[in-house]
Amino acid sequence: MKRKNFKIKKCHSLKLVSLFILSFFFGFTSYSQNKEKTKEAFAVIERLIGNRASDFELSIIDKKQVNQSDWFEIETTGSKVKIKASSNTAICYAAYHFLRDIGAVLVSWEGNRVGVPKSWPKYLKKGDTPFEYREYLNACTFGYTTPWWDWKRWEQEIDWMAMHGVNLPTAMEGQEAAWQQLWKEYGLTSNELEAHFAGPAFLPWQRMGNINSLQGPLPPEWFTKKEALQKRILARMRALDMHPVVPAFSGYVPKAFAQKHPEAKITELKSWSGGGFASTFLLDSKDPLFKKLGKRFIEIYTSIYGASNFYLADSFNEIEPPVSQDTKYEELSNYGSAIYETINEAAPGAVWVMQGWLFGDNKEFWTKEATSAFLSKVPNDRLMVQDYANDRYKVWENQEAFYGKQWTYGYVHNYGGSNPVYGDLNFYKNELTSLLKNPNKGNIVGYGAMPEGLNNNSIVYEYIYDLAWNKGQEPIEDWLQAYLHARYAKKTSAGAFHAWQLLLESVYNVKYWETRWWNDSAGAYLLFKRPTQEITEFKGNPGDKKKLKQALDILSKEAKGYDKKNFIYYDLIDLSRHYYSLCIDEDLIACVKAYRDKDITKADQLFKKIQKQALAIDNIMTGQPLNSLDNWVQSAAEYASSPQVAQLYVKNAKTLITLWGGEGHLNDYASRSWKGMYRGFYWPRWKMFLQALRESAVDNTPFDEVKERQVIKNWEINWTESK
């Protein structure tokens, strides 16, 4: 009997041991698999906080088991921070959200502040987003900001994306390698392609069919260098569960291709944006070559970069479609179906992505009837319209939320890389909460920002991407307290918080910087525009200058209690150069008026005051070395492998932010409030103009503004070509 019991106990013990071994084996296997699945998210955290990343236990649970969109759970237990989430991107957002929430880190374009505590505070939080996709980057960003970026800088930006929850980034680098192969297969020579491709900084508008050859040729090294870079970019994005949006064929062909195919139906389009640019050529959607070219491009692109699920194609960016009045809607629907079918045949199941900018930019052409016709032959789940300019246009409301198609909501905020201090947190919050409640919002699947330029107004983007998760339910005051705590490394004083409340009422209550297109002239401030007497008609810059000065004075006093490397000093530089740029604009108006009134004494005093302020701003910008003309030009030069190529890149870099190109109104569109630009470009132009105006007043002779502006333009050309 005892022996029998022994056998039973022995058998039971063996079962327990077996279960333990199996449990350990499967647990270890599950742990290993999970560690493998989250290794890229872990790497993002590790690059941010170093070996303390080992405190984080990360796991991915299939989001479809819980929610169609991303979600996360964060809990601190002892020395561990446990994060469960639906994807690597959601993990990164959760980790950053936790670290920023406790005041340990802040990640921004101006740098990262990291101050991890010795032990983690007790913390428990769950979050989710109603948006399956969080979009980022405008097609134009690849000219205005990124042309000289190497992998190190791109890795930094992809980490920023991940930590801000971005999972639908626009990925336009490296496509010229595929275009070059395509056009060579169709018989174009190297010389013909050299005459086709625009220069590095102007490629976005080449890709969208707006220009050809401007500031080219494109050096051979560009193709290979960008191809290698794009492979790394896409690999990292995909590893983080992002869905990069890559290029597709939208109908534009080189001039040489049109000449070699006289049988094809190709339209030579009018010069873009006010004239002065070479014509571009659009292949008709019904021409057999349209699908052949489109399919072959995607095949080549896929062979180089791998398969993708989202393809960007914009056939009519700021260009009116060449359709006849009698068959307008039929022709538009044919263009839409041709683009979709081409993508679908080359990449079955992929989604055609298009920018919704054109519908707001040319409302006269893109009526409801025209837009619905263009989209009519595309299945609802195979097209995504990125309606990203809601700080200017209300396209989605006027277009019945895109007639059942998928669409994303967002903002441009930054145009051309110009960087006045502005944004509107209350506007973003109110718009989002209103959108989510709107019964006519249609099939909205995404949200985000698609700026043309980066590295400015970080708070705007921090807030926008948090809105995607908090859905506008968190009071702005609470959010701001936490943000400032993370930014300034200690609990925000009453004074500093009051200063920022004034900033919300003075500069961060401006959703669009109207000055940049005052009187059809680009330039962020009057100082940044090509000089003209017409500035005396200017009605004033957006925002509240008086409250800005109050905030600036308070923050200047508060800064004395902080280390000189603290972000509070960076903010003071931003606010100071913005405030005094506004002052210069007012003084310029008064100075021009005084010279015209022949009040020479008053005008001369204002002249000296403006000069002093402009040079002072240039000096204080020393504290922002990344925001400088030298950095931009040096980055361009260093991206080259030879002095000859460096010379081309530098000219591209200098031309883009000043003359831009052509005879239209794009000069100064990409104006920059940078060190070197006040002293070396903006003030010298106005100095020449004001001196000529003074001479006219003193001599009592007519002032020839047309002549003087031409003199200034010639000076600008020499400036872009100088070494």
Image (cartoon, rainbow, N blue to C red):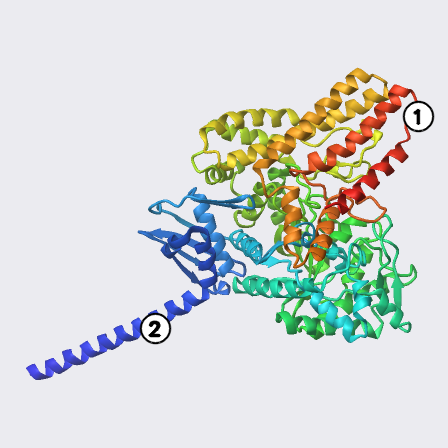
From this view, report whether residue 431 is shown above or below residue 571. Answer: below
Distance CA(mark 1)–CA(mark 2): 90 Å
Report the front residue among 659 and 133: 659
From this view, report whether residue 164 is shown above or below residue 504. Answer: below
Instruction: Quickly name the residue at label 2.
Output: 26
The quarter of the picture where residue 608 lies is top right
Amino acid on which disc 1 is placed: Pro
Report the front residue among 611 and 256: 611
Name the secondary structure under disc 1.
loop
Q: Where's residue 449, x and y in %?
A: 63, 49
Q: Where's residue 385, x and y in %?
A: 70, 57
Q: Where's residue 345, x and y in %?
A: 71, 75
Callout 1 touching callout 2 (CB < 8 Å): no
- Could you tell me which residue is drawn at 64 percent across and 60 percent down? 171
- Could you tell me which residue is drawn at 59 percent across and 31 percent down? 503
Local packing at callout 1 (Cα closer than 10 Å; few below 14, some 14-19, many 20+) is: few
Residue 518 left/right relative to 508: right
Q: Where's residue 4, x and y in %?
A: 10, 84
Residue 391 left/right relative to 128: right
Instruction: Quickly name the residue at label 1.
Output: 702
Can you name the residue that lies furthest to the front here?
643
